Image (spheres, helix red, strand yellow):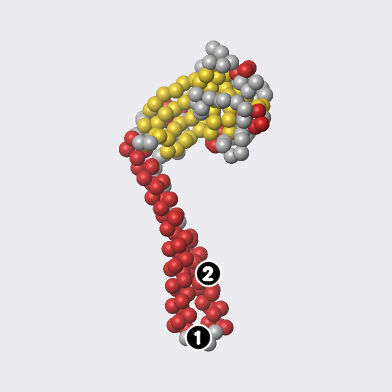
Amino acid sequence: MPIIDAHTHLGPASPAFNECGGTRPVRRPPGPSSGTGSSALVVCAVLAVLTLLASDAPSVVIAGFCVGLAVLFTVWTGLPERRAWRARASTIDDALKVNRARVTRIASDRVVEIQEVEDEGACFAFDAGAGRTSVVARQECYSDETFANSDFSILEVLGWAGAVDVIVTRAGHKVEPERRVSAERKRTLDLPEHLEIVDVPIDQIGL
């Protein structure tokens, strides 16, 4: 069973979703952390104490200056974080409204590792049977103690504009690549896109 590609919903009643990571529910991210504001208050409080000990200026002036500095620092550092949170929350809200996910299951004991160029993400070619090959190219699929895997699933949570989250689960055993294609060689190749299946035997990938 080389490749299974299907769409499902996000609810717990979906067998495919449960198989591919239903234990990690799709939900709105928590609000921005208050750690930045707390750090600013601590730093400015220490600064205020040191200034009071070393300066003859009125304590009210020193306290007012430090409070203003803390507010300015909190706003300056907190706005980008809040904007990023709103953007992320918006994409998750879209995904919950769409209520769809794409599930791709790949089961194969034959794999070729294609080394990444710079930071584009891990890349593996899996035998899809009948002289075909499927390519997996994702940041979530770096080689480790369980990947490449003989039986794994990729669940892409879909929003209005495409995937907003990716969940990778492993159900098989670790598979060592038959060979590795160097990054230098990869630069010269016209490789398939992520999850694309091509009519090329895996023995010919990267040659």
The image shows residue 128, relative to residue 88, as above or below, that is: above
Whether residue 42 is situated above or below residue 135 in the rendered picture: below
Q: Name the residue under label 1.
A: 57
Residue lying farthest to the left in this orientation: 97
| Residue that carries the numbered disc 2 in the rendered image | 43
Q: Could you say where residue 68 lies in the image, as x and y percent from the top left?
A: 44, 72
- Mark 1 crowd level (few <14, some 14–19, many ≥20, 10 Å Cα): few
Residue type highlighted by circle 1 = Ala
Where, by quadrant of the figure, is residue 95 drawn? top left
The part of the image, by quadrant, that contains residue 155 is: top left
x and y percentages locating residue 91 in the rendered image: 38, 42
Query: Residue sitting at 36 percent across and 45 percent down?
Result: 90
* Amino acid type indicated by mark 2: Val
Q: Distance between the residues labelled 1 and 2?
A: 20 Å
Which element carries disc 1, helix, strand or loop?
Answer: loop
Quadrant position of residue 117: top right
Left or right position of 5 against 9: right
Q: Is residue 113 above or below residue 201?
A: below
Task: Tell me which label, 1 or 2, sits earlier in the chain.
Answer: 2
Q: Which of 75 and 47 is in front in this view?
A: 75
Q: How many badges with numbers are in the image?
A: 2
Question: Would residue 16 be visible to someone looking at this image?
Answer: yes
Q: Which residue is drawn at 44% across and 73% down?
A: 67
Disc 2 on helix, strand or loop? helix
Circles 1, 2 touching at the beta carbon (< 8 Å)? no
Nearer to us: label 1 or label 2: 1
Could you say which is closer to the camera, residue 67 or residue 149?
A: 67
Residue at left offset 46%, top offset 21%: 4
From the viewer's side, name the closer residue of 121 and 169.
121
Q: Position of residue 109 (x, y in %)?
A: 60, 20
Q: From the top left corner, tell me how far across and down residue 37 is, in percent.
A: 46, 63
Question: Could you say which disc has been placed on residue 172 in the image?
Answer: none
